[in-house]
Image (cartoon, helix red, strand yellow):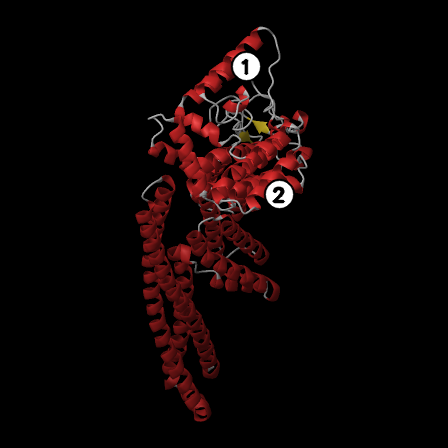
């Protein structure tokens, strides 16, 4: 943040090539002037960089940084280089408060035909000018204190909702919490598009400089001129590795400031600058983790609370569907704003915020599955309420897909969304075209199977089918027995012969077809049992593989070195998961097709039995 404002050379009013003798002389000069009450100012006190701190402590600190060879090299890198006559002319323009002319002079040098090595100083100076200018523009921005009324812990700066009275981060008691006002939700300092264009230019120049070998060659020459054994080759490489990180610090500070102040437009712009930069993945991840720490903590806390409520709800014997929907509504209301803010900052989900989103999505998906199974099991519920319930279940699963950040989590939830949508549409059609009783029976059948809860849903359609078959066979056998038992009386025999003479072949065909169809139904039912067992086994294996993938993903994010092997292992697991998921989906598709055929056969069998009974009578 203060890389330029309190640069050691700026504090002492010196050029970056000043000798240690010149540095000591300037420190003594400042001390004497301060002791005599004389104002201290130098031509490097550029106003756009902010006020220079020349307190006794600041001057001593500047001297200490320049006495240390490692910190001195860093201070030199981030201060104006005076290598050519063009650099001196441009600096004279800066001394005369003419930044535009300086910029144009360095720009013309970069575009000229001079050797590339002579352009390095112009590139560095142009970078320092553009970067310090955009930082200086934002550094002095102030928000109105009375406009911002969000609850914030004064100790750790963590944000809270109205329900909290103690900070869950540091335990500090929260006093005089203020409710966020509507005016505080749309706060913006109205930075122009030109400002953001300048930011993009500065970041671009920094990225080009970081990859410029001539720049690092000149840096090594500076290190040799310092001539100190502490400034080893390894230390220079370390400075190079951290170069972009040192540059990005102001963006993270401004990003955090604008997020806390609810200036979402400014937050969005800085997040875009960081995510679109050449900064390392690990550095961005650490920065976003620090900014979104309170968001991740709150998401996890709300997930724990909702999981506890759901677990308590599942212990109840007669579970009203309104209860699970109320849990979902409260949960969604609590996390929606937190997610909206987090998405602005880390929209690529490279930090722990992405893991928190996956956990949140799993909670929502589980709620949708529970509600779906409740509706499938409850046959007494009204058609309208069933339709509304399935709409809510679909909404839960859809929200889970929206919040999920990992691709394999999205793939896992996609099938649940498809089933929830199918159940919702079936319930809607049943409610529209059937009476309440028919609607209940039809919807129960269509919603009975859910791959996420196979054991509970499978028992529903099995019991329904079993009763249909049993009743059908009982009706047939009763009628056949009645016919055979009445065959001894002349009246009955006469009547039977009269009918059989005209319709006996038809009865025989109906009986044969119904018996053959009954055998077919039994075979399909056996195959359905086998498929269900396969789905259950595959589901367990997929769940175990998901846990392994989650563990690897977390390990990769926490590891700084040797990631190649972890990435290879991670990709192998992902490929294995995708192959297994494809096989699971194929089996499930076969299950669906067979189940539809199975239901059709049962319906046809029932019709044949009814026709047989009518003809017998």
From this viewpoint, which residue is outermost toward the bottom?
A: 501
Give the left or right position of residue 327, taking residue 67 as reference. Answer: right
Can residue 196 be spotted in the picture?
yes
**In the orientation shown, which residue stands out farthest toward the top?**
36
In the image shown, does 165 or 245 lie closer to the viewer?
245
Q: CA distance from mark 2 to mark 1?
A: 35 Å
Q: Is residue 530 above or below residue 577?
A: below
Residue 62 image point, x, y percent: 48, 20
- Counting labels gives 2
Residue at image coords 37%, 56%: 455
Local secondary structure at mark 1: loop
Per the image, the residue denoted by label 2 is 197
Q: Is residue 437 above or below residue 342?
A: below
Q: Secondary structure at mark 2?
A: helix
Which of the 4 quarters of the picture holds residue 181?
top right
Mark 1 or mark 2, which is nearer the start of the sequence? 1
Rendered residue at 64%/29% (across/down)? 141
- Picture coordinates of residue 416 (x, y %)? 46, 56
**398 sits to left or right of 47:** left
| 533 or 248, nearer to the observer | 248
| Residue at horizontal 38 percent and vertical 83 percent from the top | 512
Residue at image coords 41%, 88%: 493
**Picture coordinates of residue 573 (x, y %)?**
33, 54
Circle 1 is placed at which residue position? 55
35 lies above or below 87: above
**Marks 2 and 1: CB-CB under 8 Å?**
no
In-front residue for pair 246/360: 246
Residue 254's label in the rendered image is none
Disc 2 crowd, CA 10 A, few/some/many (<14, 14-19, 20+)? few
Return the residue nearer the eye: 291 or 543: 291
Q: Residues within 10 Å of mark 1 (few under 14, many from 20)?
A: few
């Amino acid at each position: 943040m203060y890389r330029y404002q309190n640069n050691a050379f700026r504090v002492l009013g010196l050029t970056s090539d000043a000798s240690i003798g010149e540095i000591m002389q300037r420190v003594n000069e400042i001390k004497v002037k301060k002791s005599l009450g004389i104002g201290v100012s130098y031509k490097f006190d550029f106003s756009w960089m902010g006020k220079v701190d020349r307190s006794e402590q600041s001057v001593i600190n500047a001297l200490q940084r320049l006495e240390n060879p490692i910190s001195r090299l860093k201070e030199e890198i981030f201060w104006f280089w005076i290598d050519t006559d063009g650099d001196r002319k441009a600096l004279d323009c800066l001394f005369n408060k003419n930044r535009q002319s300086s910029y144009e002079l360095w720009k013309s040098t970069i575009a000229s035909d001079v050797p590339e090595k002579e352009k390095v100083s112009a590139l560095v100076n142009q970078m320092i000018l553009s970067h310090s200018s955009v930082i200086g523009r934002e550094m002095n921005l102030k928000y109105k204190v009375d406009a911002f009324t969000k609850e914030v812990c004064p100790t750790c700066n963590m944000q809270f909702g109205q329900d909290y009275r103690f900070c869950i981060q540091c335990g500090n008691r929260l006093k005089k919490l203020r409710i966020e006002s509507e005016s505080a939700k749309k706060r913006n300092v109205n930075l122009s598009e030109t400002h953001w264009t300048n930011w993009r230019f500065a970041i671009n120049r920094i990225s080009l400089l970081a990859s410029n070998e001539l720049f690092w060659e000149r840096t090594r020459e500076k290190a040799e001129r310092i001539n100190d054994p502490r400034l080893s080759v390894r230390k220079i490489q370390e400075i190079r590795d951290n170069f972009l990180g040192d540059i990005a610090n102001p963006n993270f500070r401004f990003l955090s400031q604008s997020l806390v102040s609810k200036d979402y437009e400014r937050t969005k712009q800085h997040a875009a600058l960081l995510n679109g930069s050449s900064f390392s993945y690990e550095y961005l991840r650490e920065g976003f983790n620090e900014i979104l720490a309170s968001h991740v903590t709150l998401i996890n806390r709300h997930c724990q609370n909702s999981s506890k409520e759901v677990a308590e709800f599942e212990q109840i014997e007669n579970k009203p569907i309104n209860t699970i929907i109320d849990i979902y509504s409260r949960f969604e209301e609590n996390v929606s704003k937190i997610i909206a803010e987090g998405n602005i900052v880390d929209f690529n989900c490279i930090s722990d915020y992405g893991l928190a989103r996956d956990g949140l999505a799993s909670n929502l998906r589980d709620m949708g599955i529970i509600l779906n199974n409740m509706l499938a099991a409850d046959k007494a519920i009204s058609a309208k309420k069933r339709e509304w319930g399935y709409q809510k279940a679909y909404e839960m699963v859809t929200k889970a897909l929206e919040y999920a950040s990992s691709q394999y989590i999205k793939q896992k939830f996609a099938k649940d969304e498809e089933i929830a949508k199918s159940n919702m549409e079936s319930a809607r059609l049943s409610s529209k075209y059937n009476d309440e009783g028919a609607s209940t029976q039809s919807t129960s059948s269509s919603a009975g199977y859910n791959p996420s809860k196979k054991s509970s849903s499978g028992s529903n359609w099995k019991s329904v089918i079993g009763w249909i078959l049993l009743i059908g066979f009982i009706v047939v056998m009763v009628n056949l027995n009645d016919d055979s038992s009445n065959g001894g009386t002349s009246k009955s025999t006469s009547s039977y012969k009269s009918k059989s003479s005209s319709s006996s072949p038809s009865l025989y065909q109906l009986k044969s077809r119904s018996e053959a169809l009954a055998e077919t139904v039994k075979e399909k039912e056996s195959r359905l049992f086998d498929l269900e067992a396969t789905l259950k086994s595959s589901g367990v294996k997929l769940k175990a593989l998901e846990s392994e993938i989650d563990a690897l993903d977390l390990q990769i994010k926490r590891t700084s070195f040797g990631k190649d092997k972890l990435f290879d292992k991670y990709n192998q697991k992902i490929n294995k998961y995708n192959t297994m998921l494809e096989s699971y989906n194929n089996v499930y598709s076969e299950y669906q097709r067979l189940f539809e055929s199975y239901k059709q056969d049962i319906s046809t069998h029932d019709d044949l039995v009814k026709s047989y009974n009518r003809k017998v009578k």
